[in-house]
Image: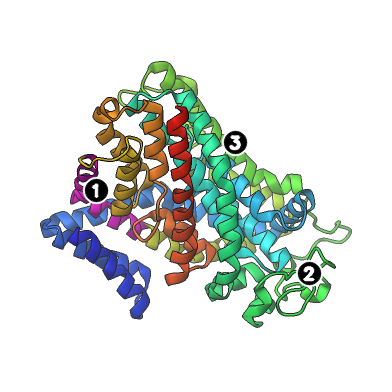
Amino acid sequence: MAALVLGIATIVVIVLRTRLDAFFALLVAALVTGFVAGAPASKVIDSITKGFGNTLGSIGIVIGLGVGLGKILEVSGAADALARAFVRALGIGREPWAMGATGALVSIPVFCDSGYVIMNPLARSIARRKRAGYVTLALALGCGMTLTHHLVPPTPGPLGVAGILGADLGGLVLSGLAFAVLLLPVVVLYARWIGPRLEDSLLPEVREAVYGRAVAAGPGAALAGPTADGTTAGGGVAEGAAGATAADEPEDDPARELGTPPDGAKPHRVGALRALLPLLVPLVLIIANTVATAIDQNAQGTLDGEGYDPSPIPAALAFVGNPVVALLVGLVLAVYGLLPRWTPRSQVGGWLAQAAASAGLIILITGAGGALGEVLRATGVGDEMAKTIASWSLPGVLVPFLIASLVRIAQGSGTVAMITAASVSAPLVHGLGISPLLAALGCCAGSMVFSYFNDSYFWVVTRFAGLDGTAALRGWSGITTAVWLGSLPLLLLAGVVL
């Protein structure tokens, strides 16, 4: 416990009280945690490098490709075309609901890290057109993904929990979907409440990337969103009330850099369907991989992954549906399908270089978060907390719920938290008087609590959302804790029904 508390305190002090950034803070916190826990110095360093490497091995390339894809969507006008179609289809004022629901749907078969990177350009485009509300949309998208990532198979965590506890997979899918639908209003309401309060805290580079230089240079109040009478806090007319004027458009429209069209060429326009393909094709490939693997594992009776030997078709889909390969396909579709043929190759290379530069710090911080999580796992903090909770006299359904919650806080990974809780709870299920399905729901719901510094997804969301320090904690840590609290009464009600 001392190792955990001092590690967290180190991050808080360095991030909030010094000139050093989160990357440095996470590495120092990993060292402090390991030394206080009594691990040898060489083991601490090995855990840091292993956690950093494993995290970037799974998400680093995806972030780089996703940022490149987002840049091409932006400069080609495709992201704006999608935003226009989105707003027309759903109507003004419902965008947070749409983002939360879209995130929940995408994250069932796709790891939320990858899904968030793919879908974030859409949130930025909608916010750019509205001239407000980016934090609200970014949080709703991210937490919508958290819901199904933690609750609904075939996401690997819930799938593994079902295998360990012997829970009915179909029952967990239906129950997890019901929980996700009932918790979505919590996501949207919290995002709508906290989003406007954090708009002024946006990192300057993210504010400029989302709203453009003209808006970013103006007073922060101009970005606070529409008021009840349809005007922005800065006094302008909110889009949807009277429409945006030409003067409201950003000064630096990237479409101007597409190159000089040849004589007689039609103006470059990207329709919503063509704009959607570079996002949709990678998602379909990843979904096909996940679903085919889950069906194949179920047929072989190896849902926990032990001894699984993929059949030929799932093996082929596992290749093309790997997030790295899928996003490579999406990036090629974006470059050759969205940009006009007269765009200079040097210009495209420059855009991709800009994207790579912007992704660099996100990748480093995400890797450092993984390093801290690995140190916490290697020192056994999560396992010790799980054993302690299992020994308490609590209502049966709360035992796996609290084990998962405390392991999540201790080491950061929701997947590790629910798998650990399932492993510890499996021998106790019969004695607790609960069904395997209810225990599985408890493990999955408990693992959503308080995503913070030792969670790599925390850094993905907050860096893309442009939040730092206390703003990141109020926004992202707060919304994940809100859905965790919301799941508790649902879990107790499920205990009566199941």
The residue mark sitting in front, 3 or 1, is: 1
Mark 2 neighbour density, 10 Å: few (under 14) some (14–19) many (20 or more): some
* Mark 3, secondary structure of its residue: helix
| Majority SS type along the magenta span | helix
Kindly identify which numbered label has been placed on residue 17: none
Q: Depth check: 426 or 59 in front?
A: 426
Q: Is residue 25 visible?
A: yes
Q: CA distance from mark 2 to mark 1?
A: 50 Å
**Range drawn in magenta:** 367-390
Mark 1 neighbour density, 10 Å: few (under 14) some (14–19) many (20 or more): many
Question: Is residue 260 toward the left or the right of residue 468 in the image?
Answer: right
Nearer-N-terminus badge (2/1): 2
Magenta span has 377? yes
Q: CA distance from mark 3 to mark 2?
A: 38 Å
Magenta span has 18? no
Which residue, given by chain and number where applicable, does mark 2 sit on? 230
At label 1, the amino acid type is Gly
Q: Depth check: 450 or 434 in front?
A: 434
Q: Residue furthest right?
A: 264
* Mark 1, secondary structure of its residue: helix
Residue at the image position 22 percent from the left and 48 percent from the top: 385
At label 3, the amino acid type is Val
Mark 3 neighbour density, 10 Å: few (under 14) some (14–19) many (20 or more): some
Which residue, given by chain and number where applicable, does mark 1 sit on? 382
Which residue, given by chain and number where applicable, does mark 3 sit on? 284
Residue at the image position 83 percent from the left and 72 percent from the top: 245
The residue mark sitting in front, 3 or 2, is: 2
At label 2, the amino acid type is Gly
Q: Position of residue 234 (x, y in %)?
A: 72, 80
Nearer-N-terminus badge (3/1): 3
